[in-house]
Image: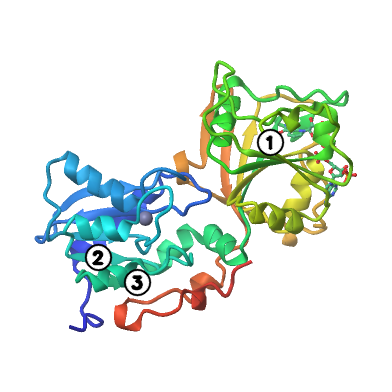
Amino acid sequence: MNFENTPYSAAEAAAMEAALKAALAGPRGANPLVGAAILSPQGEQLAIGYHRGAGTPHAEADAIFEARKKGVDTAGTTMVVTLEPCNHVGRTGPCAQAIIDAGIAKVIYAVDDPHDPAAGGARTLTAAGVEVRSGLDGGKALEMNRDWFDAVAAKRPFVTLHIAQTLDSRIAAVDGTSQWISCPESLADNHGLRGLIDAILVGTGTVLIDNPRLTARTADGELSAHQPLRAVMGLREVPEDAAVRGTDGRFVHLPTRDPAEALGMLFEQGVRHLMVEGGSSILSTFLAADLVDELIVYIAPTLLGSGTPALNDLGITTLADAQQWSWDEAGGGAVRVLGNDLRLHLRSPRGASGIIKNSVSQKNMASHSDTAEYLTGGH
Ligand SMILES: NC(=O)c1ccc[n+]([C@@H]2O[C@H](COP(=O)([O-])OP(=O)(O)OC[C@H]3O[C@@H](n4cnc5c(N)ncnc54)[C@H](OP(=O)(O)O)[C@@H]3O)[C@@H](O)[C@H]2O)c1
Ligand SMILES: [Zn+2]
């Protein structure tokens, strides 16, 4: 049967809206934001799910879990999801199989999964007799994860840049003291992020001045279960007794000043989400190279008037060339008060890239095309 010209029902469109909204609750990073809704054959929304970050159940599994928790029978239902269900066995099982096992009869997804190992979920579903359609709100789903699609297409980690600064954008005082500009709540937030990412990066300057450990720690100073790889970028040697070396082998020195090369080295080592923590030279070099997807800035109500500025020259000499960042509501909101600090969350200024311009239109599996066609604008 050809569904190509059959319009989506109002219930399906509303379910996709709900799935897109739910997706925004998740954190950005190595995985895209994904939301899912389950609809009864009558179009009633039975359950909503979303992805809470790397290593946690995917949105589809989360929605099925929510339905089961409510005692809802998923047999014969419709799953509406913002990304093509995955086919791979990663840290969590493949969603395509979970959907088949749940007896779901129809799947509507917004946009194809560009990952080679994950791609093909739609084919598996179709082969199992599930009716599959794609493209509903494809433009919105692509825009929501545009930075993630860019990073996947470029085969580099998703980059979060972290700055802890004073009101006047200083990250250290003249004498080099910088610990701690942020309040305990901001530090705890930062350590929470460290416990989720694959790697953390600073420059040799920060290592030589601050001698940071760069571990993820709980409020009582204990090491978190997951520790990021600790990367130091720069040509100078990292001292043998530097705290960042640690004893767990999760340390790497990247002897380069080229941020793209550093990202390439980390990607090779399996890093998919990197947090760049400083100092000014390193923050600036990533920003100037347009290699930052997400900005998290903690602003303390403190003034220094002198000291190390958060950023150096970005090569911008006129206002028209200023980088225009966008507020990002994902993962808890664009602006939050954390203890005594403000936490700002922003998205890259890259603007809508080619992936959006070529976004998929409503289509069915018969016209299921190569994902590369809308990834051509990637960086
Ligand atoms: N508040 C915060 O969030 C925060 C976080 C981190 C650091 N800090 C502060 O930042 C200060 C350090 O800043 P910083 O700028 O001196 O150190 P940095 O950015 O950590 O390191 C600078 C060094 O990185 C190397 N490097 C690698 N690639 C580079 C590139 N493309 N351009 C320039 N240098 C490159 C260079 O050393 P080589 O000669 O070895 O190549 C350079 O001297 C410290 O006072 C620290 O306390 C604050
Ligand atoms: Zn999945």
Residue at image point 37% right, 77% down: 361
Q: Position of residue 149 (x, y in %)?
A: 52, 63
**Residue type, mark 3 in image:** Gly
Q: Are marks 2 and 1 in contact (CB under 8 Å)?
A: no
Q: Quadrant of ligand 2?
A: bottom left
- Answer with the quarter of the image where residue 201 lies: top right
Q: Is residue 332 above or below residue 182?
A: below
Q: CA distance from mark 2 to mark 1?
A: 44 Å
Q: CA distance from mark 3 to mark 1?
A: 45 Å
- Foreground mark, 2 or 3, reads 2
Q: Are marks 3 and 1 in contact (CB under 8 Å)?
A: no
Residue at image point 83% right, 58% down: 317
SS under mark 2? strand
Q: Position of residue 373 (x, y in %)?
A: 50, 78
**Mark 2, residue position:** 107
**Mark 3, residue position:** 135
SS under mark 3? loop
Q: Is residue 144 above or below residue 61?
A: below
Q: CA distance from mark 2 to mark 3?
A: 11 Å
Q: Is residue 255 above or below residue 135?
A: above
Confirm if mark 2 falls within 8 A of ligand 2: no
> Position of 98 compared to 368: left or right?
left
Task: Tell which circle, 2 or 1, labels the residue nearer the N-terminal end.
Answer: 2
Task: Tell which circle, 2 or 3, labels the residue nearer the N-terminal end.
Answer: 2
Residue at image point 57% right, 75% down: 376
Label for residue 249?
Answer: 1
Q: Position of residue 284 (x, y in %)?
A: 77, 48
Colour basis:
rainbow
Is residue 33 in sight in this rendering?
Answer: yes
- Answer with the quarter of the image where residue 379 lies: bottom right
**Residue type, mark 2 in image:** Val
